[in-house]
Amino acid sequence: MKQTQLLKGVLEGCVLLIVSEDEVYGYEMVQKLRNYGFTEITAGTVYPLLQKLEKKDYLLSRMKPSPDGPDRKYYQITSEGMNHCREFMNQWEQLVSNVNHLIRIKGGRRP
């Protein structure tokens, strides 16, 4: 299984975690994800995801002037987005616990 397949299911939660700290514009989100180790992430993945999260009412956006060119679309998290983010964290912690438990039981043996 490729890492991109695993990442697809958790990227939404990761984006919400980042936006929960402060508002972010699209390219900035790509850079932040890369800084957190998601080096394979592209703008072509992030921009549609931001739009999807906005449609779900997890994010709000507004245009702000940019010192470097055209206005930028900044995203901030909504209360519904914060709730979804907390739910993601709880589910992730449970999943990690379950997988780690299984690995410990099997002794880390590889098939």
Image (cartoon, grey):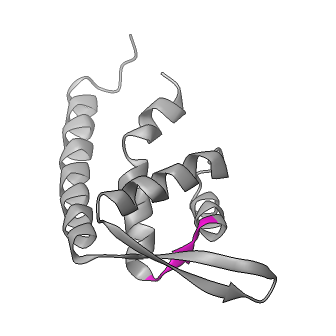
**Along the line of sight, the residue nearer the viewer: 61 or 11:** 61
Residue found 57% across the figure and 46% down from its top: 45
Determine the residue located farthest toward the top in the rendered image: 111
Residue found 56% across the figure and 61% down from its top: 36
Measured from the top left, where is residue 37 in percent x and y?
59, 55
| 67 shown above or below 51 | below
Q: How many marks do you count on the picture?
A: 0
**Along the line of sight, the residue nearer the viewer: 9 or 47:** 47
Name the image quarter holding residue 102. top left
| 98 shown above or below 86 | above
Name the image quarter holding residue 65. bottom right
**Along the line of sight, the residue nearer the viewer: 106 or 7:** 7
Measured from the top left, where is residue 17 in percent x and y?
38, 67
Q: Can the viewer see residue 42 in this picture?
A: no
Residue found 65% across the figure and 52% down from its top: 43
Horizontal side of 19 relative to 107 (left or right) equals right
Determine the residue located farthest toward the right in the rendered image: 68
Measured from the top left, where is residue 90 in percent x and y?
18, 57
The stretch in magenta equals: 22-26
Q: Can the viewer see residue 36 in this picture?
A: yes
Measured from the top left, where is residue 47 in percent x and y?
56, 55
Residue found 29% across the figure and 58% down from its top: 56
The quadrant of the picture occupied by the C terminus is top left
Horizontal side of 57 relative to 43 (left or right) equals left
| 81 shown above or below 98 | below
Q: Is residue 67 rendered magenta in the image? A: no
